[in-house]
Amino acid sequence: MKSPEMYLECVSCGKTYDPWDLRYKCDCGGILDVKRDLSKIDGEELRKLWDSRWGLKRGVESSGVWRYRELILSVPDEMIVTRQEGNTRLYPAGSAGKWAGLSDLWFKHEGENPTGSFKDRGMTCGASAARRLGAKSVACASTGNTSASMASYAAVAGMRAVIFIPEGKIAYGKLAQALAYNGRTLQIQGNFDDAMALVQDVCRELNIYLLNSINPYRIEGQKAICIETLQQLDWQVPDWFVIPGGNLGNNSALGKALMELHELGIITKIPRIAVIQAEGANPLYTMWKNHTEFKPVRNPETIATAIKIGNPVSWPKSMRAVTWSNGVVEQVTEQEIMDAKAKLDAAGIGAEPASCCSLAGAKKLRDSGVIGPDEKVVGILTGNILKDPDAVVGYHQDTLMDHYGIRGTFANKPVVIPATLDAVRKALGD
Ligand code: F0G
């Protein structure tokens, strides 16, 4: 099947551009979408083609992103920078579902990607676009996962990775990855929003290719989370997708994938999207709840450092996805995030704090009656449990109160005992 031609279109004014114009924004300042004429594609044929690629062992299409290449990015195979990303599991929620009061809750675990987060799906696409454009250097601002992913893909592609992270504010596992994958790591004295503003200037002035999710090709890759989930469900559409929101690229991608699958007739039902933000970094929630203009949060704060973002670039695309799907935006407290994390971890699944907004939000929406007890819900887990060991150990040792005001409600405290059988018996209560 021939892939339809791509072009770029401004989300605000509709102006179109050549797909390989090196730009991230429209002349009017609006952000850009990758578009295709889907009217010439037979949705049924496309679905069959994707199903025929399921389980491929080798080659570009064994990737859980490039399996869907017709809707991802049109580039020749030799330009593709891939680590066979995607192909992540879809788990029944087990005891975490019971805790949330949901009988049909599932988790798509994007922490099982090569660098431990969903970012690899967008990054394979962004890095391939960089190669197609002949870029030698790529850059991003990051709360940690984008930088880990970009450093890895740049290393695979033989490009230089320039990373801007807020000093002292990213999880240790993520900083370790950026250094290990040989990214040039610049710790900015400021927060993520400051780093994001700076990196846009740097890329323009120093001719470096920008790989934040303002880059529309990143969003195209991230659509594969949704497509792969539906394929795992034999194309049966759940009632809800629940997803954390930070810079708001991922839920924008989810919405865009659903819109395109719907236009192609591959799905006929539209699931509702619930975007979950941390209470201390909640500009989308405030806008949606109060029907007001978008207003950035000046000093975002949350233990879920991945989503500690006050001025998300992709909010117009995100709002479009929520509105189109008759979705909702919810916020969760620090305590709710970490209690949900304890339950998700203890169910044997596990994820980093920001991911656990999916469970915390699903429970909150169940408790308030927005989600019914037997509705089918898919939560997206965005990052691996090992990304942020400090948050885990702090919760279980109950030391998060002073800094974050979080109690170790479900703490599983480690105990120190003498090395004797008796002491073990006592510790186990036998
Ligand atoms: N969960 C995790 C683990 C993340 O790393 C991020 C974003 C999100 C959720 C939110 O996704 O930004 O698309 O709304 N992390 C970015 C980064 C900002 O730099 O790694 P979003």
Image: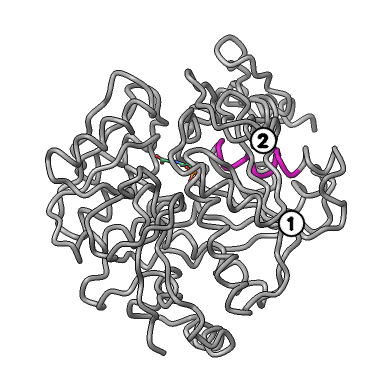
Q: Is residue 151 left or right of residue 49?
A: left
Residue at 58% in and 72% down: 261
Q: The residue under label 1 is which amino acid type?
A: Val
Q: Residue at x 64, y 37 (%)?
A: 341
State the extent of the magenta-drawn residues as a range: 353-362
Q: Which mark is residue 151?
A: none
Q: Is 19 inside the magenta-drawn segment?
A: no
Which is closer to the viewer, label 1 or label 2? 1
Residue 282 falls in image quadrant: top right
Q: Position of residue 155 (x, y in %)?
A: 20, 54
> Residue 278 location in percent, x, y?
60, 30
Q: Residues within 10 Å of mark 1 (few under 14, many from 20)?
A: many
Kind of residue at badge 2: Ala
* Camera-side residue of 308 and 402: 308
Q: Quadrant of the N terminus?
A: bottom left
How far separated are the C-alphas under marks 1 and 2? 20 Å
According to the image, label 2 marks what residue?
342
Residue bearing mark 1? 377
Query: Is residue 374 found left or right of 388 in the rendered image?
Result: right
Left or right? Give the position of 187 relative to 170: left
| 361 in the magenta segment | yes
Q: Main secondary structure of the magenta part?
A: helix
Residue pictured at 52% horizontal, 48% vertical = 382
Mark 2 or mark 1, which is nearer the start of the sequence? Answer: 2
Percent position of residue 95, x then y: 77, 48
- Badge 2 marks a residue whose secondary structure is helix
Compared to residue 41, the image places residue 407 above or below, namely: above
In which quadrant of the rendered view does residue 158 lie? Answer: bottom left
